Amino acid sequence: MSGALQIFRNRDFWLRWLSAAALLAVWQIAAAAAASPLLPGPAAVMAALVKLLLHGRLLTDLGISLARVAASFVLAMAIGSAIGIAMGRNRSIDRLFDLWLILGLNIPALVIILLCYVWIGLGEAAAVIAVALNKVPTCAVILREGARSIDRELLQVADVLHLSWWRRMRHVYLPQLYPYFMSATRAGLALIWKIVLVVELIGRSNGVGFQLGVYFQFFDIANILAYTASFVAVVMAVEAFAIRPLERSLTRWRG
Amino acid sequence: MNALEVAILRKAYPRERGELVAIEGLDFSVRQGQFACILGPSGCGKTTLLSIIAGLDRDYRGVVSRSGRNLGMVFQTPRLMPWLTAHENVRLALDPPPRAPGRAEEMLAEMQLEPFLDAFPRQLSGGQQRRVALARAFVNAPDLLLLDEPFLSLDAPTAQHLRELLLSLWARRRPTILFVTHDLREALSLGDRVLFLTAGPARLALDLPLDLSRPRHPDDAAIEALRIRLLESHPDLLRGLTAGGVAESAV
């Protein structure tokens, strides 16, 4: 109870609200000045959002897009972490794959998406793989850094204690990699949800990206902004209610 | 019976040009239950020697054999896992983990750390962290305990308190101890025997049995007298050693 009250006395809390209110005010003023359906105000977008929620397919599209985000995220993190950790721990593997990684980091997302659709076919698998492939190199680079920074002195302790593979992983390796997993997760989600929309726009017939494409053809800005707002809200909720609490519990020891 | 036999022909580290020989022709053995101190100037290869005995470094020529199976080690810094509490750090040494529930707690209680079971290392003082490291080394009932200048950079009273804790644990459990230090007074106050190493490459320069009665204190008159006798009789040997942070001199 006292913790909840504390929040309202916090200056940062009020500053945040002030900043959000200022953003809405600027938006409203600009919309009023433009007086055009191409720049609807916050109230118009809100009305569109309510209508979509009640009668449209917003929730279905959101669900489909989020499922694609989740699938490609899990795939990219699994493959990217494995490659990154192997490269960070083994110099030969690092030398062998470094060029691939640099290439992967520099190929435009759009090219990977087009190639996946051409080679794998215009299906769900191609969509998820295309998104995941875009994320794998960034994830690998971050985890490679993590694996390189593993403290050798603590590994010696593990040697002296004859820790089993699993206990060594759990108590010595992974805790040192958690910060890197978390930053890969953050960077990953920010990248993936944007690419998912492009993938949907180009080659799927449902999801937020597809729907944005449809509204674009009608220059229906109110609905485009309503879709965008709902998607951004979900992503921010994931950050606030899943990622941040997870990070806090993993780094509790830092105090 | 010997708990440890060391016969290292040669241990060298590759350098840009040639190599750095850390140990050459070092032979000694330690009896079961003996408290042996290894004394040598900084950088003479003492830590290398412990790494070889612990099995952390296998790149050497020679033979090292230990009779017991359980090994405990305390490093120069506590090397606790920062993300584990004091209790979890000690339990880490128990494999499979809680074979006898309560053993880690008992060990920490012996170290007078009961109030800090759930504290993370950053919440502990330097002396408390070393006590957790000692508890972790002792909890597995080691036959052989290797200590690498474990009380370095602690203030004198804390270091002395930890030495007394170590001696009381040793008296009750009698593991064989190899205690590395570059502090002559510390070696004389702890050991049954002091092995003096030469400045690198490390060789055995003097093997000194000690028959001083216990308990001892580094400031005892008998220890001071012995220290002065040694400085006079082996000035070359003891150059570069320190006593309480001050370089020993033969003058």
Image: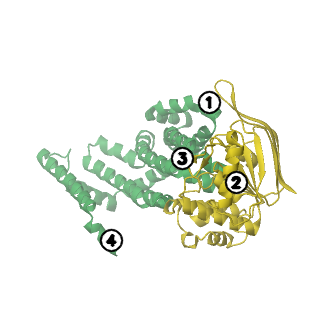
Chain colours: A green, B yellow
A205 lies left or right of A220? right
Kindly identify which chain the residue marked by label 2 belongs to: B
Give the residue number, with chain letter if any, for mark 4: A4
What number is the disc on residue A77? 3
Kindly identify which chain the residue marked by label 3 belongs to: A
Q: Are marks 1 and 4 on the same chain?
A: yes
When the figure is inspected, residue A207 is found, relative to residue B128, above or below; the finding is above
Mark closer to the observer (2, 4): 2
Q: For the residues marked 4 and 3, what is the alpha-carbon distance in whole angstroms? A: 35 Å
Q: Residue furthest bottom?
A: A1
Residue B88 falls in image quadrant: bottom right
Residue B131 falls in image quadrant: bottom right
Q: For the residues marked 2 and 1, what is the alpha-carbon distance in whole angstroms? A: 61 Å
Neighbour class for label 3 at 10 Å: few (<14), some, many (≥20)? Answer: many
Neighbour class for label 2 at 10 Å: few (<14), some, many (≥20)? Answer: some
Element under label 4?
helix
Kindly identify which chain the residue marked by label 4 belongs to: A
Residue type of the residue flagged with mark 3: Met
Q: Residue at x 51, y 49 (%)?
A: A181
Give the residue number, with chain letter if any, for mark 1: A96
Q: Residue at x 30, y 67 (%)?
A: A7
